[in-house]
Structures are given as C-alpha cells and as structure tokens.
C-alpha cells in the first residue's frame, strides 16, 4: 500500500462530507459545510483543489461542474491517523490499551468481554 498523504483538519472536514456521500459537486460540498462551518465558498474550493492535487480526491466533469469522489477510503485514513496518534502519544498499542482500561468506567459485562478477548488472544499465542 502506498503512503497515505497527510491532510489538515480543514481537509478532513471536506473529506468527511465526501465520505458521507459521493460524488458531490463543489457547490454541494459548500452547502453541507455551510451548516458546519462559516467558511467562504472559495475556501472550500481551494481545499477541494488541494485534495485533488494530493491524490486524495478524484473529479470528473459533468456539464459546467466538477463532481468529486474520494480516491482513498475513510478507513485507510482512520487507520493511518490512529497509528500516528498511538505512536506519538503512547509508543505502541499496549500502553494505550492499559491507559484506557485503567481510566474507563466499565460495566461487569464490559469487563467480561475484555477478559474473553484477552483469553482468545492468549489461546492464539499457544
């Protein structure tokens, strides 16, 4: 798998609109983001252009408008960003999991589910 291009928080906002539904025109993206942000339409169009240049979005012409579609699935970005966060903040998965388990208010059922998962992991190692 090739390297996933880095995208800014603002670019994430644009991508979320397109991951929710695609293809969409620039004006449709502007309209949706208008309910979430106070961005100028030219800002949104600039972000769309950057995302196309990075290879994160594809577009096709339809009449006098462009229709945008994600070139990279949301799941791939979530995986990449999660990995980056875990490495930056915790170093690896185990310290992160331990931290969250220690901090979480878990029900009896959730604790039992964690035990079941850990038991499965242990069995798989044998």
Image (cartoon, helix red, strand yellow):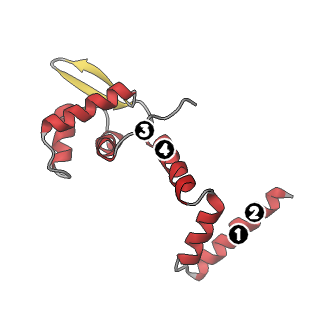
Q: Is residue 64 left or right of residue 47?
A: left
Mark 4 = which residue? 75
Q: Could you tell me how far apart the alpha carbons at marks 3 and 2 are, in whole angstroms?
A: 35 Å
Pointers 1 and 4 in contact (C-beta within 8 Å): no
Pointers 1 and 2 in contact (C-beta within 8 Å): yes
Mark 2 = which residue? 120
Q: Is residue 35 left or right of residue 116?
A: left
Pointers 3 and 4 in contact (C-beta within 8 Å): no
Pointers 1 and 3 in contact (C-beta within 8 Å): no
Image depth: mark 1 or mark 4 in front: 4
Q: Which disc is residue 6 wearing?
A: 3
Q: What residue is drawn where x is 48% and y is 48%?
A: 81
Q: Which disc is residue 116 wearing?
A: 1
Element carrying mark 2: helix
Q: What residue is drawn where x is 52% and y is 46%?
A: 79
Image depth: mark 3 or mark 4 in front: 3
Q: Could you tell me how far apart the alpha carbons at marks 1 and 2 are, in whole angstroms?
A: 6 Å
Which is more N-terminal, label 2 or label 3? Answer: 3
Query: Along the line of sight, which residue is nearer the eye, 26 or 93?
Result: 93
Q: Position of residue 108 (x, y in %)?
A: 60, 82
Q: In the picture, which quadrant includes the N terminus?
A: top right
Element carrying mark 3: loop
Q: Position of residue 109 (x, y in %)?
A: 60, 78
Check disc 4: other Cα within 10 Å, few if <14, some if 14-19, many if 20+.
few
Q: Position of residue 119 (x, y in %)?
A: 76, 67
């Amino acid at each position: 798998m090739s390297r996933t291009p880095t995208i800014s928080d603002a670019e994430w906002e644009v991508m979320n609109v397109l991951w929710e539904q695609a293809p969409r025109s620039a004006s449709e993206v502007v309209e949706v983001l208008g309910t979430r942000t106070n961005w100028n339409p030219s800002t949104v169009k600039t972000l769309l252009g950057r995302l196309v240049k990075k290879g994160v979005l594809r577009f096709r012409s339809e009449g006098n408008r462009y229709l945008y579609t994600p070139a990279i699935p949301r799941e791939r970005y979530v995986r990449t960003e999660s990995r980056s966060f875990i490495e930056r903040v915790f170093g690896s998965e185990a310290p992160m999991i331990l931290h969250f388990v220690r901090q979480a208010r878990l029900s009896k059922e959730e604790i039992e589910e964690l035990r079941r998962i850990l038991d499965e992991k242990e069995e798989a190692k044998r």
